[in-house]
């Protein structure tokens, strides 16, 4: 059967990944199977990656916590990986009931070989010889995302939250698939969160770099690791809805986008907290004295600003994950003798707003427009950080919606 045409591109091998909301119950699993069957009937070779049913992983984690406050990470992986295994079996059964040749393949059966860091493993190799042979005969492999196996010990591992996206992209790369479709509960990637900015519009295409920035800066559409892997392996990825039959957003190389917008999207994150160390000596080594112990404690520091020195003293402000704020303060307090600061304060009520676009490389004035727009709305900027394709600012969280809407309009992103 000749390959069908999807979005103007001949595709013969596709990996389709379905998230937790897409497989939340039997009716939704039936909907997933119908989408897969349609692709098979069109002549594609299809592999499927599934997440656990919505809410199942949280329940399994709760079981582990209730069993023991300090548990064996290897046994934790055995438990929490079970959700994806259940979904894979049910999906394969549903496909079989529709006349599609299908079977489930667990991580250790393929195998998907990973590092031995239980709970946060990284995929090292996927051996696809048998899968490719079966797919060439028309069989659909259904693979549980989020899991793999350590080659030496044969212990089950998990990839961390959101790991099914990474599983799908890695499988697509290993299979040399023409495209990886990530099905979610949204119709694609938007210029901003449409729940806040009603004039946000869906993007037809976005570059890997832009999607990576958006994912790392608060957009929850794709897991950051999956985007980084897609960019490294040049896996053409599409984000689309399980519930609406409309084209999604393609994540592609920059060369595929003919007319590049200066700003493609605006992201926000409420996952940060601000820490300020005041009255410290403006001397060589003071930054190392502050950030060295934080790094040793595995606390990620993001935005950093140092104020102008006055009378030999300065202030240092930086952001850390909101969930790490208490631990961060304890680390700094433990270094008071070497840092010799006057005061230490924190503020969890902040939000990071970021404008993103590869077009920034060749256009000036993006940052100044952001600063001017926020000033016109009376919004004070507390911290600023930039990269080649993004500008981020930290503001009080109470101004989140006002800032997003104003910036969306200022950069001409509003839908007609």
Image (cartoon, rainbow, N blue to C red):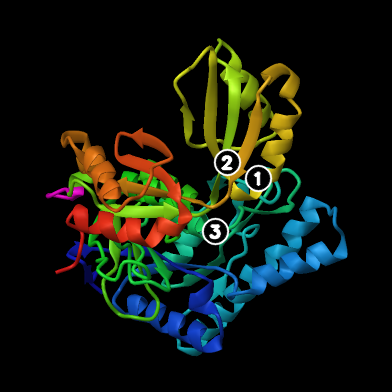
Report how far apart the C-alphas of labels 1 and 2 lie in the structure: 7 Å
User: For residue 403: magenta?
Assistant: no
- Decide if residue 3 is on the left or right side of residue 306: left
Tag 1–tag 2 contact (CB < 8 Å): yes
- Decide which of 34, 182 is in the foreground and name it: 182
- Asked if residue 219 shows in the view, the reply is no
Residue that badge 3 annotates: 162
As helix, strand or loop, the secondary structure at mark 1 comes to helix
> Percent position (x, y) of residue 350?
50, 50
> Percent position (x, y) of residue 52?
60, 71
As drawn, the label of residue 324 is 1
- Decide if residue 260 is on the left or right side of residue 279: left
> Percent position (x, y) of residue 404?
33, 58
Residue that badge 2 annotates: 320
- Would you say the magenta stretch is mainly helix, strand or loop? loop
Looking at marks 1 and 3 on the same chain, the residue that comes earlier in the sequence is marked by: 3
Q: Which residues are magenta?
A: 256-260
- Decide if residue 120 is on the left or right side of residue 193: right
As drawn, 61 above or below 259 = below
């Amino acid at each position: 059967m000749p390959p069908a045409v999807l979005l103007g591109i001949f595709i013969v091998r596709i990996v389709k990944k379905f998230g937790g909301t897409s497989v939340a119950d039997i009716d939704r699993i039936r909907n997933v199977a119908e989408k897969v069957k349609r692709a098979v009937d069109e002549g594609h070779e299809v592999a499927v990656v599934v997440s656990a049913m919505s809410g199942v992983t949280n329940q399994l984690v709760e079981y582990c916590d209730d069993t023991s406050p300090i548990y064996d990470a290897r046994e934790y992986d055995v438990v929490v990986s079970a959700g994806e295994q259940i979904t894979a079996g049910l999906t394969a059964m549903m496909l079989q009931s529709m006349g599609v040749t299908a079977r489930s393949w667990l991580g250790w059966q393929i195998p998907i070989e990973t590092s031995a860091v239980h709970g946060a493993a990284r995929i090292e190799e996927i051996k696809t010889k048998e899968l490719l042979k079966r797919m060439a005969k028309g069989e659909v492999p259904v693979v549980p995302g989020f899991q793999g196996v350590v080659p030496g010990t044969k212990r089950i591992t998990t990839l961390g939250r959101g790991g099914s996206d990474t599983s799908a992209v890695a499988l697509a790369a290993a299979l040399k698939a023409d495209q990886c479709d990530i099905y979610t509960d949204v119709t694609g990637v938007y210029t901003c969160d449409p729940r806040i900015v009603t004039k946000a519009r869906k993007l037809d295409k976005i570059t890997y770099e832009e999607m990576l920035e958006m994912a790392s800066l608060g957009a929850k559409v794709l897991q950051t690791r999956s985007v980084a892997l897609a960019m490294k392996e040049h896996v053409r990825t599409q984000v689309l809805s399980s519930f609406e039959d409309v084209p999604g957003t393609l994540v592609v190389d920059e060369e595929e986008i003919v007319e590049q917008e200066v700003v493609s999207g605006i992201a926000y994150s409420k996952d940060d907290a601000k820490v300020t160390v005041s009255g410290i000596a403006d001397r060589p080594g003071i930054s190392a004295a502050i950030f060295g112990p934080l790094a040793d404690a595995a606390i990620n520091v993001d935005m950093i600003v140092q104020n102008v020195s006055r009378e030999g003293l300065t202030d240092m402000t930086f952001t850390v994950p909101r969930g790490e704020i208490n631990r961060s303060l304890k680390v700094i307090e433990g270094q008071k003798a070497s840092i010799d600061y006057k005061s230490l304060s924190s503020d969890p009520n902040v939000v990071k707003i970021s404008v993103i676009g590869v077009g920034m490389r060749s256009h000036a004035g993006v940052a100044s427009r952001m600063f001017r727009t926020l000033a016109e709305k009376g919004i004070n900027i507390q911290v600023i950080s930039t990269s080649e394709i993004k500008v981020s600012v930290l503001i009080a969280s109470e101004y989140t919606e006002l800032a997003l809407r104003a910036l969306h309009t200022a950069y001409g992103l509003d839908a007609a």
